[in-house]
Image (tube, rainbow, N blue to C red):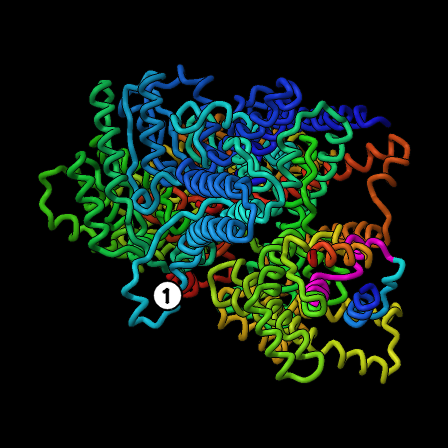
Amino acid sequence: MSFASLPFVGLVAAGVILYYLVPKRAQWLLLLAVSMAFYLAGGAKRAVWLVLVAGLTWLAGLLLEKQNARPAPDKTAKTAVRRVKKRICAACLVLCFGLLYLMKYWNFTASALPSAIGDKLPRWDFVVPLGLSYFIFQAAGYVIDVYRGKYPAQKNPLKYGLFVSFFPQMVQGPISRYDQLAPQLLSARGLDWRDLKFGIQLCLWGYFKKLVIADRAAVLVNAVITENCPYGGAVVACGILFYCIQLYCDFSGGIDITRGVARMFGIDMAENFRRPIFATSLTDYWRRWHITLGAWMRDYVFYPLSLSRGFGKISRWARAHIRGTGGKIFATSLATFIVYLIIGVWHGANFRYIAFGLWNGVLITASLLLEKTFLRWKAALHIDDKSAAWRVFMTLRTGLLVFVGRYFTRAPRLRSVFTLLKTTVLHPQPSQLLDGTLLSLGLAKTDFLVVALALAVLLTLECFQERGVHIRPALEKKPGFVQWLAVTALLLAVLLLGVFRAGYIPSGFIYTQF
Amino acid sequence: MSSKKWVLVFLATVFVLAALLAGLNAAVDPFGAFGDRLLSWFSYDETNNPRVAKLSYLEQHHDEYDSYILGCSSTSSFPVDAFNEAFDARFYNLIMYGADMRDCEKITRYLIEHYEVKNLILNVYLDNGLEYDEESDRLTKSLHYKEDPDTSALSFYTRYLFADPRYALAKLNALRTDTILPQTFDVFDERTGCYDKRVRDAEPIGSAERYLESYPVFADYPHQTLSLPYTEPCMQSVAAIRAMCEEAGVNLTVVAGPVYAAYLKNYQTEDIAAFYRSLAQVTPFWDFSSSSVSCEMRYFYDGTHFRNNVGEMMCARMTGRTDLWLPDDFGTYVTADTPEEYFTDVLSPAALSPDEISAQVPILMYHHLSEDVTNSEMVSPEQFEAQIRALSEAGYTGVSFDELQAYVLRGAPLPEKPVVITFDDGYESNYTLAYPILQKYGMKATIFAIGVSFGKDHYKDTDYAITPHFGAAEAAEMAASGLISIQSHTYDMHQWPPYESGSAVRENILPLPGESEEAYVQALTEDFTRSRALLEDAAGQPVDVLAYPAGQYSTLAQVTLQSLGVHVTLSTNPGVNTVVRGLPQTLYAMLRFGITEDVTPEALLDMIR
Amino acid sequence: MRKQIMEILTEICPGVDFENEKALIDDGLIDSLDIVAVVTELMEAFDVELGVDDLTPENFNSVEAIEELIESKQS
């Protein structure tokens, strides 16, 4: 069920109304029912995998809980318990990620291997269930947390199931933590009009970004970034720029809708974006973009990896054999590199995504290793890194690096990435920007105007937010009429510029097709 | 403002907006989904979505019909009136562009279950094997929920209640710019269900070169490589339709409409043969798909659609009428027993040669004969006689417009070198000087008389003297001879401004500045009716030819005159006419050579070659 | 011990006032990479085992908190 469809709006409306009408003890059951309805609307067959993963991880949680509760008076008992726990946790994670690997990455690996081996391997033809990568990560986080004894496991399978399948998060996350989301899901609450208001505002804002900006930008992107792109570098760069716009507005808009819908049920879900345009370094960028994925990687990959015994050994070797800071931070740099590689691969089963992971990994790791060097250069050139000019430079530089990174994720194949990059740099043909080529890609002048104005609104709001101004409270101080005007303007923009943007066929045209 | 108030006001705003949108869409109803009760402009709705709008129309009007024609876009040219007569039925043409056979199956089921259906004519076109069960746009290509078991009433109504408001606004805008003749937004004739092709049916057609200028698609025909992947499901639907008709006692006729030869080349011969062969296994049908008609571009008004004229020929062949000209190879009744070779042989038809299908007809235009030649409209009797003699000796035969009509419509023969001699205005000199000469050489001629000056020598009721015009007695005598035909030059639409008192002067048949379409049509109708009554009364011959004053004409004038039964119209543009069998449009706005005094007989013969 | 901890911290994150800041994690004054570096150094310096479960804000928000953590691990 797409967010931008009448059935989804209907489902949410019905869900919210019923939520505040049913007896409080049954509220979480209603959420579960709505979530099931949402998931089944996409096809009952796909729900099987969700149930499988939920069941597996719930069971693992219970088993780990039992181990956690075992009396372990002395060190041998403790080690025994730890060994059992390790086995349970490892088995569960292997099954879950194995399933993910099989469904998403098997065909890719089979075709990537040299044909002598690859051709002999069977290919699967699964229909990948909605949000597979997201809910597997979320469920795995739960298992690891229980393993670490962070909180007791959930005994009720349905209550646990709600955590895994809560419908707003099924499409594109955020990846939530059990101790932050589950208590909210399971607690009862009365109607707080502020929740409804904030939820509606968030949803509208999300739809605005998605329908008015992202869907429009997508038209240009799809027309330009193709296998045999005939356009010059300037137009290609334009295409990737619009892709950055599309991706941010679509993803963050979707997350806004997710959080807005959850808010209407009185539930606060984790933020996933914090104005990434203002990032001053790639590391900073990944703390503002897809925050929950970065946090998940940090807590469940980076920390365990870099604090593990194996990495401890690597660290000692590095200190001994590599001079200076390089030796000290070698292990953590390696762990960082691995994390970004995984992030790249998480995006999809394709060489492009591996390259994307490498792009981020290499740049960030290099910046770590060269940090001291950069400090020396800055001192030598008398650069004050608190000055506005320097910060602007850093932001632009980061923007450029992110921009280039998008070539990797959007080009149709790895080969096209390099072709497109070459075209951008070597054959810009900037005249194409002014000679009407841009108007021949499916967007009219009014569309560009709409995108520009909408982006201006978006950027202005984000500027205020970056300075610490909270938009919502500021709006609440305005007179009622102004508030109504603002939300109605947003609503009209979403309807007239978003919902009714495309699909209109003038009657003269209908007839002449035949 | 409290949060509660905010939420409630917001919801109220949403409801108001939704209600406004739904209200707009329901009231204006650009697709006819709600029955278009307010505006009742089905011709517009059907253009947006014929599947939905036509069913809405039938829900209100089905008791006016008892038979249906069904198929995709080329089905429009199946003539409802001709079939009504042949079957003694009241047909409605359910042509829906882009309809595939699955749509037809669903609709047949609905028709049989809910309406009176005595006869059903099904058009099976090659494109029905190209697409099947396709609904690429939910608003414009979907079926009405009543005829489609796969669509619920709820989803149907919500879809149209909350459709893009631009459709409703476009309809309101079209209301403002609506004209009598169809535009691209209202292409259907509500009463019959066919496309409103009045313009195409009345447009002048001539030589092949001239046709290519108006229809360049035939000069550079687009080539595609197409296949017929859905032949089997298509034929299954046809079989289902046949079974339904048999069970309900409906008289089913299956027809394979004409396909333009160049379009056929887009497909593989085996695919086409397999298509029609499998159709023959399912049901016997009338095969018009490939014949000499398919090779003549003038029978088609675009790359794939044949004209109404061809539809008339189809009906004539199917009902065994002999009053219309039909090429011999046009239309075969195919059954399951038809030998296999037929299906491949028929794909290489021989085109009719220009001589078989058309004739070159020059028309000469005279006005006044006089010894005293003072302007270009006058010719001296001596020169006139010399010209007529030259024509006669060169082997030209004067023909009447009746003979031309007979050639075009009924395939009657024309002499080898036809020529039409015409006189405009109806001057007395035509009777006193031209008539004797025409009699001497046995040349037929047609005189176009103006109504207000019939038998007069003064301008209307003024004192201005004008060249004398002949009157009823002379007309009767000339008509009785069988050589002269008296036809119309309008009653009073060739006015002479200097002699007119008012400011609204009709110098020609075009509307007056600022005149509304309705007022104009009424004025033209009244004028022609008067002209016809006057002349038919006087000469005792039917009046169905009109020469445009000063050669000025418009599409609306053409269409109006055609609806009044005018079969031939003439302009003053020079050229030799190409009249084509089966195309009455070749008799419209015919070209004429204005003959002046200084045209020598040799020059004349040269001109008309 | 406090002095040693302070040395380690200032070496890895120069420019932060570790004396007075009480919300080192919550305010983002030390990031995840620094944490790992600090923890590795702490483990070496005080010969204790620190695991991922110990990487909570409560344990690292101030020098005092770190002190407490190490003491609890040593016992």
Vertical arrangement, residue B20 with respect to residue A219, above or below: above
Residue found farthest to the front = A74
> Would residue A246 be seen by someone viewing this image from the given angle?
no
| Label 1 element class | helix
Residue C67, compared with residue A127, is above or below; it is below
Asked if the stretch drawn in magenta spans residue C36, the answer is: yes
Residue B581 within the magenta-colored segment of the rendering: no
Q: Left or right: A484 with respect to A132? A: right
- Residue drawn where x is 35% and y is 47% of the image: B299
Residue B363 place in picture, x, y as percent: 42, 51
Q: Position of residue B180 (x, y in %)?
A: 57, 33
Residue A299: horizontal and vertical position, in percent?
63, 55
Q: Which residues are magenta?
A: C21-39
Q: Residue at point 83% right, 80% down? A: A378
* In this view, C26 is above or below B601: above
Q: In which quadrant will I find the C terminus of chain A? A: top left
Which three-letter amino acid code belongs to the residue tagged 1? Ser
Question: To which residue does mark 1 refer?
Answer: A111
Residue B607 visible in rendering: yes
In-front residue for pair A107/B398? A107
Q: Nearer the viewer, residue C32 or B101?
A: C32
Disc 1: CA contacts within 10 A as few (<14), some (14-19) or many (>=20): some
- Residue A227, position in %: x, y? 49, 67
> Nearest the camera: B188 or B465?
B188
Subunit bearing disc 1: A
